[in-house]
Image (cartoon, grey):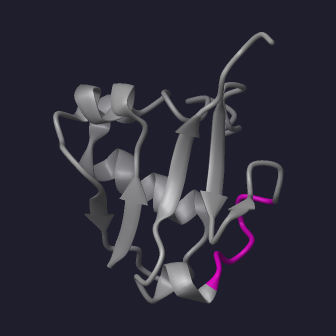
Amino acid sequence: MIRVVLPPHLRNLAQVTGEVRVEVPGEVTQRHVLDAVEERYPMLRGTMRDRVTGKRRALVRFFACEEDLSNESPDDPLPDRVVKGEEPFLVVGAMAGG
């Protein structure tokens, strides 16, 4: 079971509190985790990544094990600690401006 932490506005949209847990069949990658989250919470489709291209939305970042994975390939395997459920996969709403 993969643990996923969503930012507050996406938790509100999905009507969940705390982290969510999803089953990811096969290799655990960003793409497969997001596919599983969107399958379980269809109202989140298009919020974290573009519906057509599948690319990450500009103001959304992905982290795992204190590493920014936002610009990594969505098909790279996630860290083993995420796969084992020891650490969550974080979806973070980035701040715009400065």
Name the residue located 63 percent from the left edge and 50 percent from the top edge: 62
Q: In the drawing, does residue 59 fall left or right of residue 85?
A: right
- Report which quarter residue 22 is drawn in: bottom left
The front one of 94 and 10 is 94
Dominant secondary structure (helix, strand or loop) of the stretch shown in magenta = loop
Name the residue located 37 percent from the left edge and 52 percent from the top edge: 37
The percent coordinates of residue 39 (x first, y second) are: 32, 50
The percent coordinates of residue 92 (x first, y second) are: 55, 40
**In the displayed structure, would residue 97 be above or below residue 61?**
above
Magenta part of the chain: 73-79
Work out which quarter of the rendered image holds the N terminus and state it.
bottom left
Q: In the drawing, does residue 60 fall left or right of residue 98?
A: left
Work out which quarter of the rendered image holds the C terminus and state it.
top right
Name the residue located 68 percent from the left edge and 77 percent from the top edge: 77
- Report which quarter residue 69 is drawn in: bottom right
Q: In the drawing, does residue 84 fall left or right of residue 68?
A: left
The furthest residue to the front: 98
Q: Is residue 70 magenta?
A: no
The furthest residue to the top: 97
The front one of 83 and 33 is 83
**In the displayed structure, would residue 77 be above or below residue 63?**
below
